[in-house]
Image (spheres, rainbow, N blue to C red):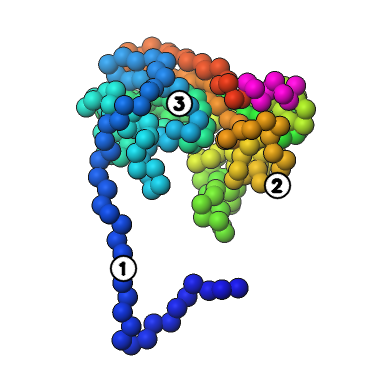
């Protein structure tokens, strides 16, 4: 096994190559958005799979934030910082579905408070391998960084509290359609929790390794944010939005029946 370690001796010269500078603030880009709802305070977006939410290493642009800057101009909340204007919560790049975005700080604070007190409800549809037993239940297992692979999350004793409620909606050929409701919102929570109980998401390249490939080409994990519920942060009106399965997941369902 080779080692990346190299002993340094007196007189050696070390050269450090710095990457080119990147803008501190994301730029506006004309990227199409599927807007479910919009007023002067907030938007509800139906995010497609493959769209990164905010700029990060490896994804400096072409993100939802870049699209929002073009659509909303300067009317986005600044609470998330210059890299995440308006972003109240996020979805993984390869998870599709509903997100809420704040246009100003008052709306952001109101929506964030609902996230904290768990009154902002989020429901997901997930295709998993096998059928969970029991067919409805609660997964209460703390999530933190994987002790070996730091790019992954895992159920670990030292992790943060994480609770997912699930219900099997349909038993398919070797798989199941499961409804998941988040009580908390940890990174990769549904993916980690369902893998933890032995039923990883179909098509999940990180938490579903070793499982058979999907029966049709699927370029992402089979997870969709199908419903979001909250109280409008300014008007106080209860709001609920739904999003049907996108074409790739509908096709997956049809071949698994």
Find the distance from the CA under tag 1 to the CA under tag 3: 39 Å
> Given this view, does label 1 or label 3 mark the residue nearer the observer?
1
Quarter that holds the C terminus: top right
| Mark number, residue 16 | 1
Find the distance from the CA under tag 2 to the CA under tag 3: 28 Å
Q: Is residue 72 visible?
A: yes
**118 left or right of 69?**
right
Q: Which class describes the residues within 10 Å of circle 1: few (<14), some (14-19), or many (20+)?
A: few
Which residue is tagged 3? 47
**Disc 3 on helix, strand or loop?**
strand
**97 left or right of 125?**
left
Q: Is residue 132 above or below residue 41?
A: below
The x and y percentages for residue 186 are 50, 40
Looking at the picture, tell me which residue is in the foreground, 110 or 5: 5
Of callouts 1 and 3, which one flags the residue occurring earlier in the amino acid sequence?
1
The x and y percentages for residue 58 are 40, 47
**Which residue is found at the position 35% from the left and 43% from the top?**
60
Find the distance from the CA under tag 1 to the CA under tag 2: 39 Å
Magenta span has 57? no
Of callouts 2 and 3, which one flags the residue occurring earlier in the amino acid sequence?
3
Of callouts 1 and 2, which one flags the residue occurring earlier in the amino acid sequence?
1
**Disc 2 on helix, strand or loop?**
loop
Q: Is residue 119 above or below residue 220?
A: above
Which residue is tagged 2? 210
**Disc 1 on helix, strand or loop?**
loop
The x and y percentages for residue 217 are 64, 33
| Mark number, residue 62 | none
The residue stretch that appears in magenta: 250-257
Q: Quadrant of residue 139?
A: top right
């Amino acid at each position: 096994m080779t080692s990346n370690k190299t002993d340094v001796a007196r007189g050696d010269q070390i050269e450090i190559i710095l990457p080119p500078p990147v803008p501190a603030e994301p730029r506006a880009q004309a990227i199409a958005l599927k807007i479910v709802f919009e007023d002067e305070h907030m938007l509800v977006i139906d995010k497609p799979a493959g769209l990164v939410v905010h700029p990060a290493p490896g994804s400096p642009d072409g993100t939802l934030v870049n699209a929002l800057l073009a659509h909303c101009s300067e009317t986005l909340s600044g609470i998330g910082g210059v890299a995440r204007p308006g972003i109240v919560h996020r979805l993984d790049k390869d998870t599709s579905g509903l997100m809420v975005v704040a246009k100003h700080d008052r709306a952001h604070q109101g929506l964030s408070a609902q996230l904290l007190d768990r009154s902002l409800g989020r429901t997901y549809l997930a295709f998993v391998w096998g059928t969970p037993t029991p067919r409805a239940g609660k997964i209460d297992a703390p999530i933190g960084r994987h002790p070996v692979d730091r790019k992954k999350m895992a159920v670990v004793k030292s992790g943060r509290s994480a609770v997912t409620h699930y219900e099997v909606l349909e038993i398919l050929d070797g798989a199941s359609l499961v409804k998941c409701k988040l009580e908390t919102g940890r990174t990769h929570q549904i993916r980690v929790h369902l893998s933890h109980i032995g039923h990883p998401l179909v098509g999940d390249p990180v938490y579903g390794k070793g499982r058979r490939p999907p029966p049709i080409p699927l370029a992402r994990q089979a997870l969709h944010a199908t419903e979001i519920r909250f109280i409008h942060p300014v008007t106080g009106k209860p709001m609920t939005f739904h999003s049907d399965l996108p074409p790739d997941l509908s096709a997956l369902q049809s071949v698994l029946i």
